[in-house]
Amino acid sequence: MRLRQAQLKRRIGSVHALHQENASAQIKFDITDLLRVQVPHEDPLVVSLTVAEYLVRRVLINPGSNANVMPRITFYRLEIKPEKLKPIGNPLLGFDGKRVEPIGIVELTVQATERVLSESFVVVEIHPFYNLLMGRWWIHRVQGVPLTLHQVMRCLGPDRTK
């Protein structure tokens, strides 16, 4: 019985490549990535992205968030027509654990490397430190790997290369 439990744990805990074609697709970080970073640091990963054909700076990459979040001020700065905003009934939980009632949700294009994806943003009334917050679903869809130590995010291109 113990042998079977040990084998089951080993099988559950192991990681295997699902597709052989993915084996050649690698994302690497090296010491040259650190040349422009002052270490040690505790900085979050902040990038610039093209959203709805605007270059948006101060975009927080947050793997801990389920949602892509857009402060209302960014919504207005991107000159998005208010009728594109759709109602949403689910509240968000803020960093402090308090409920935040969304103003609505909007679908916009986001470009990272050669990838252009249509992404949903929950628009909220907050006093932002960042212009956008990109959550883990976007990170997964863009096939990205964020690395806060190096202050860089790498993504696989549409052809599954770096």
Image: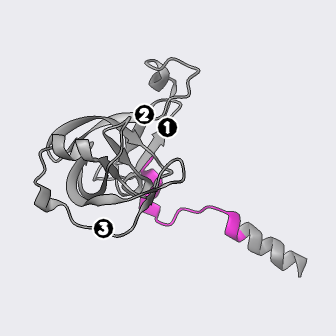
Q: Nearer the viewer, residue 116 or 3?
A: 116
Q: Secondary structure at mark 3?
A: loop
Marks 2/3: CA–CA distance: 32 Å
User: Residues at badges 3 and 1 in contact (C-beta under 8 Å)?
Assistant: no
Sequence-first tag of 2 and 1: 1
Residue of label 1: 147
The residue carrying pointer 1 sits among few (fewer than 14), some (14 to 19) or many (20 or more) residues within 10 Å by Cα, namely: some
Residue of label 2: 152
Q: Can you tell which quarter of the image residue 132 is in?
A: top left
The quadrant in which the N terminus is found is bottom right
The residue at 46%/65% (across/down) is 19
Q: How many marks?
A: 3
Residue of label 3: 88
Residue 19 versus residue 153 in the image, above or below: below
Mark nearest the camera among 2 and 3 is 3
Magenta region, residue range: 11-28
Residue 46 on the magenta span: no
Q: Is residue 20 visible?
A: yes
Mark nearest the camera among 3 and 1 is 3
The residue carrying pointer 2 sits among few (fewer than 14), some (14 to 19) or many (20 or more) residues within 10 Å by Cα, namely: some
